[in-house]
Amino acid sequence: MKRRSFLKTAGYTAAAYITPKLSEKQTSVHEADLNSVSPEKHASVVVQDNKVYIKTHTLTAVIEKGVLTSLMSIINGEEFIENPDVNSFRALQLLYSNNEIINVNEEKFGSTETRQISDRSAEIVFHSWEGDGVLFISVDVETGDLLIEPSAYSSRPGVRACRWSITGLKPNLELVAPFFQGIKLKLDDPLIKNMRWDWPHSWEAGLAIFQSQEGGFWVHTQDNRYRYKAIQTGLESDPFVIG
């Protein structure tokens, strides 16, 4: 079995789709503008200087060392990421029992490689003392979605999950999510800060919406094998993280 296939088999989480959204007052105007420009839809994924640059007809994004450093709406130019910490934040992690978290990155004699796979996909490969991982990045040309597929492996038994996180979310964003049958709260609200929500019990549907006054974006999972999954809202030290 090839190493990349082995990694996906050993520790895999459901694919996450990231899609910008508009406020209700903007929708009709901008849809008309988009349709008048060109019916053709373009999407590209480019690796340059160990960074992944993504562009579709709905968004632009930049990923460095697995960290989403920029996510911008093409429609209104709104940026959703602010001051991400690429040097100390670890986007890919393995979760063990008792909430033990192991970073999968270049620490402890490790390395990180960014590879171009095709004109619409790339992957970031992590090798570390604690485990290995792959972050596969691609785009959906039709919808303009950014697709993230994280996977990781460790020879140490007891892995509960593989987690990919987004840091530096703008403080003005509100989270709309199916917790408690539906919530709309600021990310630093104590009701949701540093909480892990399991699907399908407390996280009742695999999606989360981050909205501002001008628009926002949403994250949703696609998983036809009905595997257990969860979403983490904030950390003890930083509420503006989602994983």
Image (cartoon, rainbow, N blue to C red):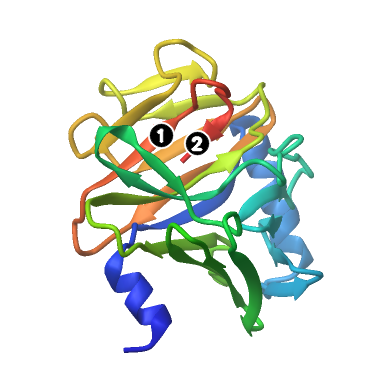
Residue in the image at 70% along x and 52% along y: 32
Work out whether residue 208 or residue 96 is closer to the camera in this orientation and state it. 96
How far from the left and from the top, in percent, is residue 40? Answer: 68, 75
Q: Secondary structure at mark 2?
A: strand
Residue in the image at 75% along x and 62% along y: 36
Residue in the image at 33% along x and 23% along y: 182
Q: Secondary structure at mark 1?
A: strand
Q: Where is mark 2, residue-wise?
A: 242
Q: Where is mark 1, residue-wise?
A: 232
Do callouts 1 and 2 mark residues in contact (Cβ within 8 Å)? yes
Give above or below for 131 relative to 25. below
Give above or below for 165 relative to 223. above
- In the picture as drawn, the residue positioned furthest to the bottom comes out as 1
Give above or below for 2 relative to 161. below
How far from the left and from the top, in percent, is residue 135? Answer: 51, 65
Work out whether residue 239 or residue 219 is closer to the camera in this orientation and state it. 239
Mark 1: amino acid: Gln
Work out whether residue 57 or residue 36 is closer to the camera in this orientation and state it. 57
Mark 2: amino acid: Ile
Specify the quadrant of the image occupied by residue 41.
bottom right
Work out whether residue 113 or residue 41 is closer to the camera in this orientation and state it. 113
- Is 26 left or right of 183, judged from the image as shown? right
How far from the left and from the top, in percent, is residue 79? Answer: 75, 40
- In the picture as drawn, the residue positioned furthest to the front comes out as 109
Residue in the image at 66% along x and 83% along y: 119
How far from the left and from the top, in percent, is residue 216? Answer: 61, 36
* Marks 1 and 2, how far apart at CA: 6 Å
Label disc, if present, on residue 52 of the rendered structure: none
